Amino acid sequence: MAKIIVVTSGKGGVGKTTTSAAIGTGLALKGHKTVIVDFDIGLRNLDLIMGCERRVVFDFVNVINGEANLKQALIKDKRLENLFILPASQTRDKDALHKEGVERVLNELSDEFDFIICDSPAGIESGAMMALYFADEAIVVTNPEVSSVRDSDRILGMLSSKSRRAEQGLPGIKEHLLLTRYNPERVQKGEMLSVDDVNDILAIKLLGVIPESQAVLNASNSGQPVILDADSDAGQAYLDTVSRLLGEDVAFRFLNVEKKGLLKRIFGG
Amino acid sequence: MSEPSIELKGSLFPLSVLYCQDFSVATLRQELSNKLAQAPGFFTQAPVVISVENCTQTPDFAAIKQLFIELQLVLVGVCGADATIKKAAHAAGLAALQPPKAGKTTEPAKPAAPAAPTAPAAPTVISADNKTIDGNIRSGQQIYVKGADLIIRGTVGAGAEVIADGNIHIYGALRGKAIAGAGGDASKKIYCYNMQPELISIAGNYWLSDTLQGDYWGKPVCIGLQDGQLMLADLF
């Protein structure tokens, strides 16, 4: 049985797809057979971030409608042996998803994979509800600013009331907080909420803090999940995050302003 | 200029509606007595409307009215009556009211009827059970407790609403809205460990967060109503 993890946020543009790609890739790097499912029907992006946009033939909606089987729609990653992508349909909208179809596809994937990462669309409408409904765990992606935090709070409410686990009275979805686009310098200046501020409001377990980094944009544009850029701060932060997701105890990094060394101070850094 | 000495104005009042399957006085007496015994004094002289939607034959309204007087309830009228029943109700001095719009409350009673015909239908009679919630109330969630206190072992997030006819106790931060004494009881209070609300209200008197900025912001606070004015005080 696969573990189903939804990557969600409520608010758009906070880094759900970047995170789904990075965490899915990270789990595969660690040897777990992983599939990333793009639930953002109509606004397909995951294929771009994963760099497999030219290989999309069939998609999630085709599988739900029985127009293709799962094997035809799954795209195998070229870099990693045990990483697969199930792309969203670009020509349809969120109403193409329905609970029975999604459940059937997830059940089928569940037999074959260790982890199913569901990349949720923004919002709290049916698309986002479908992505979170069957989840065992949730990664709530939040930027350190007030509107993102409030939207995350809303999604946490949905997770605890609208999911399958909530409706069937099973143990609740395990919730993780992932802070992205964190900039310690701006936190120090009081321009950005700190980790403690966000923790205080949302009160769920912190899974990781991803620093604001040029590497993320570069990675997206080149279709390489940022976690593969092991030299970058964001890549390392995602690697730490995946380790924590797998239950390892890893210290948090990139939380404080880096002290510039003498050479850097002289020559600029 | 002479002002008219009387005025008729439309107003809305909360009324308890009694839903039942069996309109015989004996059954009603037993079921109602049982219900009232669960919350002694709570319903003393409470205005009640009987729903006669499920009624097949005209009930003996005069006898039912007498029963209500015995039980210290005030029978105001009937709702959902057809023409014949309406006539009988009027004859007994009862008002015929429109059925409440939230028709959902009447629905659960119907499927339950065949299984337990003598069981009281939809529990519109309020129980004095307080509601306790272990955990946080997230943005967008709304909790309403009818006729009792609400106790929250957690935080009420910004954009969440907690409402109770009784008191509200929050053992965490209050960042959303808290409305106590929603039924109009001015003696109810709001207690919280960290007050940063969007709105607080007791029996219809409310303050927004702008008014609440100051010494008590972010502190453990008890909020009550004194002479129609909201009052803040240290929780301890």
Image (cartoon, grey):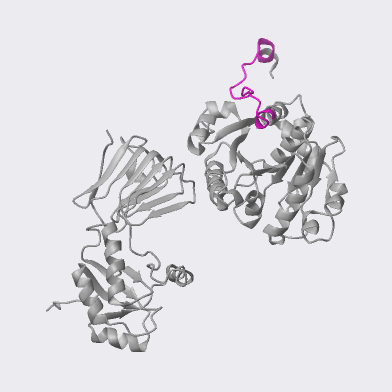
Above/below status of A31 relative to A261:
below
Toward the viewer: B200 or A244?
Answer: A244
Estimate the x, y position of residue B211 in percent, counting from the top left: 32, 45
Residue ID at (53%, 26%): A188
Q: Looking at the image, can residue B15 be seen?
A: no
Q: Quick check: is B148 in the magenta stretch?
A: no
Q: Quick check: is A251 in the magenta stretch?
A: yes
Magenta part mainly helix, strand or loop?
A: loop
Q: Which residues are magenta?
A: A243-265
- In this rendering, position of residue A252 left or right of residue B26: right
Quadrant assignment for the N terminus of chain B: bottom left
Toward the viewer: A49 or B179?
Answer: B179
Number of numbered discs present? 0
Quadrant assignment for the C terminus of chain B: top left
Residue ID at (24%, 57%): B40
Residue ID at (23%, 72%): B68
Estimate the x, y position of residue B228 in percent, counting from the top left: 21, 53
Q: Looking at the image, can residue A249 be seen?
A: yes
